[in-house]
């Protein structure tokens, strides 16, 4: 006889005391009551995983998109190699990964908003609350559940890109092209300086580089050109002096040219993968918090898409007087600054050199200090989670 | 331009080409979204208030005396005995003192003193908008009370809400589930929230409510009755001592209602307490042993069904006999009744207040002794519905 089918004499038996079959849910005190159990996480994962339409969209945007693009490129290259280069080019790697980051944020925000709002919109929230389970624990269970879907899929999509780049890419170039000058690859800063000092003509040619020109003054650079044989030694001396003076800036430009003209190394790919996953995690947590705050999946998703596709690019491209620090609070700008250098565009500049992932700087606005960048990113994750949990704990069910 | 080029351009172009004018567009969009969100939230709040009762009315004389200590009716009743208990803490399944919950100026729950005895089916009866659901939501911690105190199974809530709810199963409003999940998966979700051994009770619960055969179908394909049964199954996951069911008969066909009644009866037989809210008077009368009648947020009466029916008015007897005219004369002369009327072949006898079954037997003896053949004699008690209408504001009267 099942435990529930109690009849007759059994019914008359005294019922077991409270907690006889284990601690009642939510009865714990302090932090332990706030922590979600593995069962809570796995059932939330089940609930999300069985949303077929959402899951198909997630898979398409995280894995399907790079597979489709690379598949087409591989086919085109196989059919007409002269018109279509290999699928594993640095430009395609960079473009695809940047696009995956945009899509990743958006789909993560959608999954987050779904996880945050559907309990409410489908009326299940109150039935979960009446179990006595701590509301914060119910909220926190959504985080590992959602991330356990998104992180592996984003990783799988990026792995496809890395594999194609590594095994169906261009042969490793031996020289980096800077302002029409071919410079050997894989030089350290000292080696680059030595090479430039022993190649004054190339050093002189590099005077056309915007960074060097702005750093040394256009007037000075103009005089470096070998206007006449008599003036040449002086020009060479001047060029060498300029190289010594601006070797840091030249090396930064050289590094950018190196990473954008060659397929990224494995360690660079690892950095990019970590950055991509961070972008996804931020999107998910922001979506979850906003979804829980508003109880509206659609509104939350559209808000975050607007933030990512409209507001962030505008703020990244324009300095608003007296609001520069407000602009920097937008997570997309901090993430742009953190963007690994291999994903940077050729005009990228500024930002903390080699800071964390070798960020390229937040586009057209002055970069923020590394600590501020980290604080904005961590702040977005923590604040949205806290807002969502607080709202869930306080709202009428 | 191939697809890869499009992807690259799509990923990088916005950063280069938007200008300051678009800042305003973005800000306008954000402002519109904030406005929309605020408006939706306000509409929801307004709808919630609208569903609650109108302005609170002065409370009528409300017997809040010890329900369990009231005398049982003298006649044998088919209902379960409402156990006699003292008011010691823990003896009531549900206990509230001065519980009040307001939505703006409206008091949805107004100074409610409710005592639900253990081990019975208890009806919380009131017209639509009387504050039944709000009381249940307040008891379960779904919304906060403005004042007053309450306890479930003797455990104060919300102070020790987790411990109290561990042995409470509840359905608030209609049972809601994830439509894209099967019934079994939905129960898994609730069992995970219940914790401990609740997962082991999924199969027995489904079996018990008769859903084992459809447990793996998606809930969106369930009928209303099946959802109600699944709701009860979800309540049973915690092996509850107290079940709180909000309008459990809603949307059920007669067969479904009968099944639900039987299920509630079984649950009570097992020693559990079932508190159900309803506006279906007949159902409460059939299902429950005791009842509280609520109107405009206030409890206007509470007690056992039989007790309330006795309060409702004098019992009546209908007699079919061979000589109605003679029967009327005899009964009037014998002073056995308050009034005697005749309607065709049927004599209607209204008994005096406080009359017992012995008076009915005396009527029968009197008629037979005078050689009047009695073909049929039946008790015709006042229905709970009539009395309910008389004590609530439904008829436009102050109770």
Image: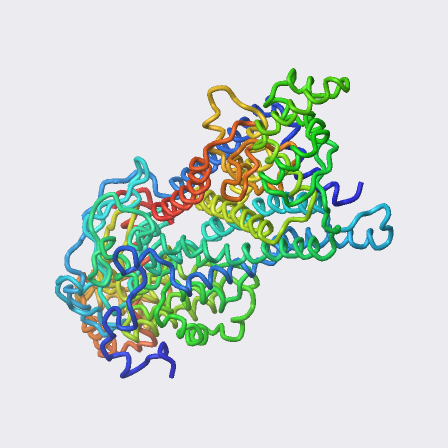
- The answer to which of A311 and A77 lies nearer the viewer is A77
With B1 as the anchor, is B186 left or right in this view? Answer: left
The quadrant in which the N terminus of chain B is found is top right
User: Residue at point 36% right, 69% down?
Assistant: B264
Single out the residue that lies furthest toward the top: A219
Picture colour scheme: rainbow
Task: Using the rendered image of the protein, determine whether residue A57 is visible from the camera's viewpoint.
Answer: yes
With A250 as the anchor, is A374 left or right in this view? Answer: left
Q: Position of residue B45 (x, y in %)?
A: 40, 39
User: Residue at point 74% right, 21% down?
Assistant: A226
**Where on the picture, by quarter, is residue A194?**
top right
Rendered position, B251 above or below B4:
below
**Where on the picture, by quarter, is residue B80?**
bottom left
Task: Using the rendered image of the protein, determine whether residue B387 is visible from the camera's viewpoint.
Answer: no
User: Residue at point 34% right, 45% down?
Assistant: A394
- The answer to which of A330 and B303 lies nearer the viewer is A330
Q: Position of residue B327 (x, y in %)?
A: 27, 69
**Where on the picture, by quarter, is residue B77?**
bottom left
- The answer to which of B40 and B30 lies nearer the viewer is B30
User: Residue at point 15% right, 61% down?
Assistant: B89
With B140 as the anchor, is B207 left or right in this view? Answer: right
Q: How many marks?
A: 0
- The answer to which of B368 and A390 lies nearer the viewer is A390
Q: Position of residue A52 (x, y in %)?
A: 60, 58
Q: Position of residue A162 (x, y in %)?
A: 65, 54
């Amino acid at each position: 006889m099942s435990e529930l089918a109690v009849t007759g004499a059994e019914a008359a038996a005294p019922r077991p005391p409270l907690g006889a079959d284990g601690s009642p849910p939510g009865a714990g005190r302090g932090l332990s009551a706030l922590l979600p159990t593995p069962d809570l996480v796995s059932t939330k994962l089940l609930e999300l995983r069985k949303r077929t339409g959402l899951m198909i969209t997630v898979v398409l945007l995280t894995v399907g998109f790079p597979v489709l693009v690379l598949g087409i490129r591989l086919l085109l290259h196989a059919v007409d190699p002269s018109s279509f280069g290999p699928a594993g080019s640095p430009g395609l790697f960079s473009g695809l990964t940047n696009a995956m980051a945009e899509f990743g944020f958006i789909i993560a925000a959608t999954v987050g908003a779904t996880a945050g709002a559907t309990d409410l919109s489908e009326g299940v929230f109150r039935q979960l609350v009446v179990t006595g389970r701590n509301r914060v624990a119910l909220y926190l269970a959504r985080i590992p559940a959602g991330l356990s879907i998104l992180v592996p899929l984003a990783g799988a999509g990026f792995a496809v890109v890395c594999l194609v780049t590594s095994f169906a890419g261009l042969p490793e170039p031996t020289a980096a092209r800077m302002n029409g000058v071919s410079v050997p690859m894989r030089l350290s800063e000292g080696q680059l300086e030595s090479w430039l000092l022993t190649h004054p003509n190339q050093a002189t040619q590099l005077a056309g580089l915007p960074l060097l020109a702005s750093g040394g003054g256009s007037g000075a650079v103009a005089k470096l050109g070998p206007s006449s044989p008599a003036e040449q030694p002086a020009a060479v001396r001047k060029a060498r002096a300029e190289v010594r003076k601006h070797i840091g800036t030249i090396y930064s430009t050289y590094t950018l040219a190196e990473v954008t003209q060659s397929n990224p190394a494995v360690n660079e790919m690892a950095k990019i993968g970590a950055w991509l996953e961070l972008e996804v995690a931020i999107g998910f947590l922001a979506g979850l918090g906003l979804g829980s705050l508003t109880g509206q999946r659609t509104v939350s998703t559209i808000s975050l898409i607007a933030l990512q596709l409209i507001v962030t690019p505008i703020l990244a491209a324009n300095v608003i007087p007296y609001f520069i620090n407000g602009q920097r609070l937008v997570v997309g700008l901090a993430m742009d600054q953190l963007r690994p250098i291999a994903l940077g565009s050729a005009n990228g500049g500024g930002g903390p050199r080699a800071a964390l992932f070798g960020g390229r700087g937040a586009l057209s606005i002055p970069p923020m200090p590394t600590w501020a960048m980290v604080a904005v990113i961590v702040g977005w994750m923590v604040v949205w989670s806290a807002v969502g949990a607080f709202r869930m704990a306080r709202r009428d069910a | 331009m191939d697809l890869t080029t499009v992807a690259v351009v799509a990923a990088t172009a916005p950063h280069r080409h938007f200008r300051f004018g678009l800042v305003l567009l973005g800000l306008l969009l954000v402002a519109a979204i904030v406005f929309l969100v605020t408006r939706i939230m306000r509409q929801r709040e307004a709808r919630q208030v609208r569903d609650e009762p109108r302005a609170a009315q002065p409370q009528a004389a409300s017997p809040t005396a010890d329900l369990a200590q009231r005398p049982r009716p003298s006649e044998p009743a088919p209902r379960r005995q409402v156990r006699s208990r003292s008011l010691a803490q823990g003896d009531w399944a549900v206990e509230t003192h001065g519980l009040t919950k307001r939505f703006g100026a409206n008091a949805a729950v107004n100074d409610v003193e409710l005592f639900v005895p253990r081990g019975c089916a208890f009806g919380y009866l009131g017209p639509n908008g009387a504050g039944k659901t709000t009381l249940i939501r307040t008891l379960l911690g779904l919304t906060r009370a403005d004042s007053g105190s309450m306890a479930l199974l003797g455990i104060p809530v919300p102070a020790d809400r987790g411990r109290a709810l561990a042995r409470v199963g509840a359905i608030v409003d209609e049972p809601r589930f994830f439509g894209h999940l099967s019934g079994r998966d939905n129960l898994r979700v609730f069992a995970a929230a219940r914790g401990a051994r609740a997962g082991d009770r999924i199969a027995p619960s489904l079996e018990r409510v008769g859903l084992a055969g459809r447990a793996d179908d998606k809930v969106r394909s369930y009928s209303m009755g099946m959802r109600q049964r699944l709701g009860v199954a979800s309540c049973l996951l915690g092996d509850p001592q107290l079940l709180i069911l909000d309008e459990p008969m809603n949307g059920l066909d007669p067969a479904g209602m009968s099944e639900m009644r039987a299920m509630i009866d079984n649950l009570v037989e097992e020693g559990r307490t079932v508190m159900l809210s309803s506006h279906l008077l007949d159902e409460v009368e059939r299902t429950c042993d005791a009842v509280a009648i609520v109107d405009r947020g206030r409890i206007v009466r509470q007690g056992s069904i039989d007790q309330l029916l006795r309060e409702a008015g004098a019992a009546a007897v209908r007699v079919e006999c061979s000589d109605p005219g003679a029967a009327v004369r005899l009964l009037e002369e014998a002073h056995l009744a308050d009034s005697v009327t005749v309607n065709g072949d049927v004599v209607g006898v209204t008994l005096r207040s406080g009359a017992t079954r012995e008076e009915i037997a005396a009527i029968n003896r009197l008629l037979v002794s005078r050689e009047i053949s009695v073909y049929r004699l039946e008790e015709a008690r006042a229905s709970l519905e009539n009395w309910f209408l008389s004590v609530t504001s439904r008829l436009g009267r102050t109770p």
